[in-house]
Image (cartoon, rainbow, N blue to C red):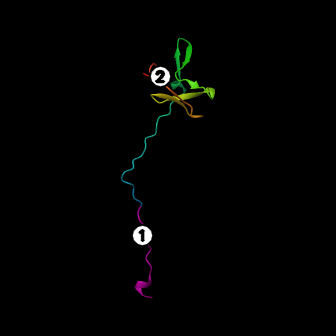
């Protein structure tokens, strides 16, 4: 047998990292304490509940509007509600 007849294993191309992509930071989970406020043995809700879904679904605060994540209902804030 000749030396040229031996097959050398092909080298696989190395995986490259994409230059523009960075890893996303994981957001810290917010608990139920972010939805309620306790003052003098009284519990009050900080966000409104959805008008379509009922009292179990809180609406997300997006600065100029409130949005329900369950059904997609959106209620825009009035100038008085903005902080």
Say what secondary structure mark 1 lies in.
Answer: loop
Q: Earlier in the sequence, mark 1 or mark 2?
A: 1
User: Where's residue 78, x and y in %?
Assistant: 47, 22
Residue in the foreground of this view, choosing between 68 and 4: 68
Please tell me whether residue 34 is drawn above or below residue 10 in the rendered image: above
Which quadrant would the N terminus be assigned to in this image? bottom left
Residue 17 shown in magenta = no
Please tell me whether residue 6 is drawn above or below residue 65 in the rendered image: below
User: Where's residue 30, x and y in %?
Assistant: 50, 30
Please tell me whether residue 17 is drawn above or below residue 8 in the rendered image: above
Which quadrant would the C terminus be assigned to in this image? top left
Q: Which of the labelled discs sits on residue 78, or is there none?
A: 2
Q: Residue at x 43, y 67 (%)?
A: 12
Say what secondary structure mark 2 lies in.
Answer: loop
Q: Nearer the viewer, mark 1 or mark 2?
A: 2
Structural crowding at the residue carrying mark 2, measured as other residues with C-alpha within 10 Å and reported as few (<14), some (14–19) or many (≥20): few
**Disc 1 target residue:** 11
Which range of residues does the magenta coloring cover? 1-14
Q: Residue at x 56, y 12 (%)?
A: 41
Q: Residue at x 41, y 63 (%)?
A: 14
């Amino acid at each position: 047998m000749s030396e040229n007849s031996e097959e050398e294993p092909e080298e696989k191309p190395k995986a490259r990292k994409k230059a523009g992509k960075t890893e996303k930071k994981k957001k810290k989970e917010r608990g139920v304490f972010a939805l309620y406020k306790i003052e003098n043995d009284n519990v009050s809700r900080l966000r409104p509940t959805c008008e379509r879904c009922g009292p179990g679904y809180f609406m997300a605060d997006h600065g100029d509007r409130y949005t329900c994540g369950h059904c997609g209902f959106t209620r825009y804030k009035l100038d008085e509600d903005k902080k």
